[in-house]
Amino acid sequence: MHHGDVELAGDALQGVDRSLHRRHGLVDRTDLAEPTAPVERTAPTGPAGPTTPTGPAGPIAPTGRIRHQCEHMFDTTRIARDRKPAPGTYLGPMGRDAVVVSYRLGGHDGVSVEARKWAGALRELGFTVRRVAGEIEDGGEPGDLVVPGLAMAATEPPDPGTLAGALDGADLVVVENVCSLPLNADAARTVAKVVAEHPARVVFHHHDLPWQRRSLAGLEHEFPPRTPGALHVTVNLRSRRELEARGYTAPVTLPNFFDLDPVPGDRDGTRAHLGFARDELVVLQPARAIERKNVPGGVRFAARLAELLPGTEVRYWLSGPAEDGYQPTLDRVVARAAVPVTIGRAPSVADAYAACDVVVFPSTWEGFGNPTIESIAHGRPCAAARYPVLAEILATGVRLFSTDHPETLVRFLAEPPERRARYFEVNRARARLSYDLAMLPAALDAAFAAHGWLSW
């Protein structure tokens, strides 16, 4: 980030950032967790200088423990900022082959989205990249291979010989969540066995871990596999600490990264396509309908906004379909909703954010929570629930609204456009310090080097 960007954030913190926090009680990095004991109420220091953010209970200083842990978490991304290459240059090997393995790739789920970013970063580092998955939802690319036994719902495990053949010639194998969250345990076991016998270097990219799901906690003794020499990369600090506590060697944390200057989507066309009225306030929950996404909480938040905005038609929009047997529950939620409900995808992520007015993110658990940063990139206010990993995101200095206090968002929506624009500008500048997608190639290169992979 350029020095001028830091000054921009600092200037804004002296004005609009403070006034918005006083006025709206925004959730921020000082609002990390429910304190179990009294904490000293002091003004914290953020990445751009001193701030005095105010939450519903007044200004609260972050605990030293959380601040230190989150600073440690982003050591690699700081290195990446310093090492970010000029366009068209490479930090790593030329002509090396990487294979990305997962249950499904090429879709809209979080693992697929992040795997796509990693593939792009690996190409920047000079790798050729191909994909092996049970499902490839974007039609596939040259070199990709669908192995049906890898799919989450597969009834037969993948053939080890077929999988080993798919990895033939690979210098690097990136296992995307297959061995982290064994939703198909037979597939996960096969992948673990094959990569352990393969000569390539192996990265286990953990978006989730088995003990973080009640239904999978019994598999903790075998997943993630303790493959000798493998690099374990988590998307959050909590998971890294949990791996360390279980004796895994030198796991590292790389948060998800984002394009913070996206091409704007088609607001009018997308709203017309989905049947939204011009004057409707559309509340988007960019998620699939599964239990932990807390769709009822999203609907309740939209209904509460409608109560606080008499005379305004508020619509709740869920972008993804029901999965994991959630359809009957979703049907009941929709039938009882106090606001109109739309379910369906926009043509693109950019179109979805352009078409909405507010983002709601009421999840009870996330490995990361991409909409928190995507909403900043696309200039939409986001109200989030207190899922555990949110504290790490807020510790970087970005600001979000709380689903517990919809009235603060209503007051923000009534602010003059220039004040709201300044809020988004500051939030984007803060996010750029830790989550800029341009830093990912260097962050991966730094993680490889720290693991001892200095040459290929």
Image (spheres, grey):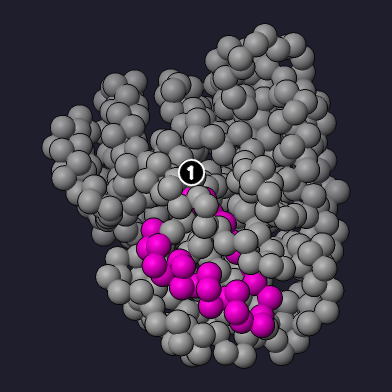
Whether 387 is drawn above or below 210: the answer is above
Question: Which is more toward the observer, 316 or 199?
Answer: 199
Where is residue 441? Give x, y as percent. Answer: 72, 68
Q: Nearer the viewer, residue 288 or 427?
A: 288
**Residue 65 seen in the current view:** yes
309 with respect to 195 (left or right): left
Count of marks overlaid on the render = 1
Left or right of 251? Residue 297 is left
Choose between 226 and 447: the one closer to the eye. Answer: 226
| Residue type marked 1 | Gln
Residue pictured at 55% horizontal, 15% vertical: 56
Image quarter for residue 44? top right
Q: Nearer the viewer, residue 220 or 260?
A: 220
Instruction: Please provide the residue range marked out in magenta.
Output: 183-210
Residue for badge 1: 212
x then y, percent, for residue 440? 69, 63
Which residue is depicted at the point 66% across and 30% down?
A: 29
x and y, in percent, of residue 33 in the image? 59, 24
Q: Residue 186 falls in which quadrant of the image?
A: bottom left
Q: In this view, does 75 lie above or below 299?
A: below
Q: Is residue 216 left or right of residue 327?
A: right
Number of other residues with Cα within 10 Å of mark 1, as a class: few under 14, some 14 to 19, many 20 or more: some
Determine if residue 348 is in view: no
Give the residue displayed 72% in from the left and 82% down from the top.
Answer: 126
Determine whether, in the image, residue 436 is placed left or right of residue 105.
Answer: right
- Residue at the image point whose x is 69% and y is 64% from the top: 231
Report if residue 186 lies within the magenta region: yes
Residue 230 in the image, given as x and y percentages of width and height: 68, 67
Q: What element carries label 1?
A: helix
